[in-house]
Image: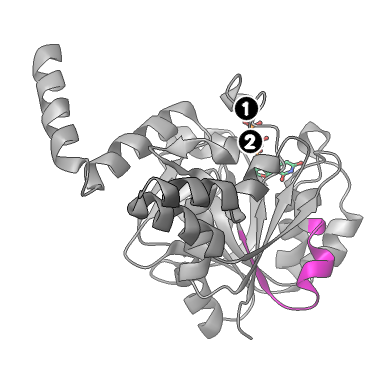
Amino acid sequence: MRIRKAVIPAAGMGVRFLPATKAQPKEMIPIIDTPAIQFIVQEALDSGVEDILIITGRGKRAIEDHFDRSPELEEFLRAKGKTEQLELVGRIGRLADVHYIRQKEALGLGHAVLCARKFVGGEPFAVLLGDDLVRSKKPCLEQLIDLYAELPGTVLAVAEVPPEDVSKYGILDAEPVREGVYRVKDLVEKPPRDKAPSRLAVIGRYVISPSIFSILAETPPGAGGEIQLTDALRVLCREEPVYGLIFEGRRYDTGDKLGYLQATVEFALERPDLGADFRAYLKQLLKALA
Ligand code: UTP
């Protein structure tokens, strides 16, 4: 079955990015000049997804405005002869059919995914989290969808992390299927280093079987009093095949301040309009710091 629908949960409070997130959605914080969520929507579209549902909450109106047309701004830019910017703004408004649903209370990522139940119906679907940006030749989600076409089931994007970082992630207890592909037996949420069954960490890209919804509906609140997607995936992997795929690409945790800075610097270095000047500036700075 084709993966036609993607869900982007964006109703979290963004506590790690206060005070920036006091009055604006975390997902709208830009990497240079592009809101993080625009990269995520683009990755879904580049992976062949047709319909996108963003789970929003209170204070997230800016996300809806961003993907909407903006007639006043477009008229202003047209009148000023700013054709390049006019094209840029118009293109975002035409990017995709984006749908929205509000999660009335931030009851956790699992609860946010459950809010997509009606939209998704009975087909497998993608989930993309805005905190993880991936720079890769083939979009990270497309890599998962390709594996799904070969091994139907649920597919989780995983990255091998250093031992000191396993306690920050959901970690796979899994058996190798072949190089880079694992069959998941269980998941352990944020284990201490000496209790981790592997160094394979789940990052924010998933292809999920619709069976997850009935499991989520029965999942009690877990860590932090929130309904956890990991808890439901643990049940799912006992009932249906769940795979982990080590994806190709560089991943940035933009929900973390250092990860955000790394993404900003590395994206700037790659930009045709900024890269050369920024590189020269960094070299100068490094010399001065040495
Ligand atoms: P996080 O656990 O990173 O939470 O959520 P957060 O609120 O976004 O950020 P911090 O940790 O407080 O700084 C992971 C993903 O799940 C979404 C978030 O928007 C994020 O994309 N989420 C989380 C929801 O949509 N609803 C929730 O109730 C919780």
- Would you name the residue on which mark 2 appears? 25
Which residue is pictured at 75% across the width and 65% down the height?
236
Tell me the magenta residue range: 114-127
Of 274 and 223, nearer the camera is: 274
The amino acid type, in three-letter code, at marker 1 is Thr
Q: CA distance from mark 1 to mark 2?
A: 6 Å
Asked if marks 1 and 2 touch (Cβ < 8 Å), the reply is yes
- Does the magenta run of residues contain 221? no
Circle 1: is it few (<14), some (14-19), or many (20+) Cα within 10 Å? some
* Residue 39 x, y percent position in the rendering: 47, 53
Q: Is residue 137 visible?
A: yes
Which residue is pictured at 52% across the width and 55% down the height?
40
Of 201 and 276, nearer the camera is: 276
Q: Is residue 176 visible?
A: no
* Residue 158 x, y percent position in the rendering: 49, 56
**In the rendered image, the vertical position of residue 272 relative to residue 179, given as above or below:** above
Whether residue 159 sits left or right of residue 94 in the image: it is left
Whether residue 225 sits left or right of residue 173 in the image: it is right
- Would you name the residue on which mark 1 appears? 21
Does the beta carbon at disc 1 come under 8 Å from ligand 1? yes
Which secondary structure, mark 2? loop
Rendered-image quadrant of the C terminus: top left
Which residue is the extreme one toward the top? 289
Of 84 and 48, nearer the camera is: 84
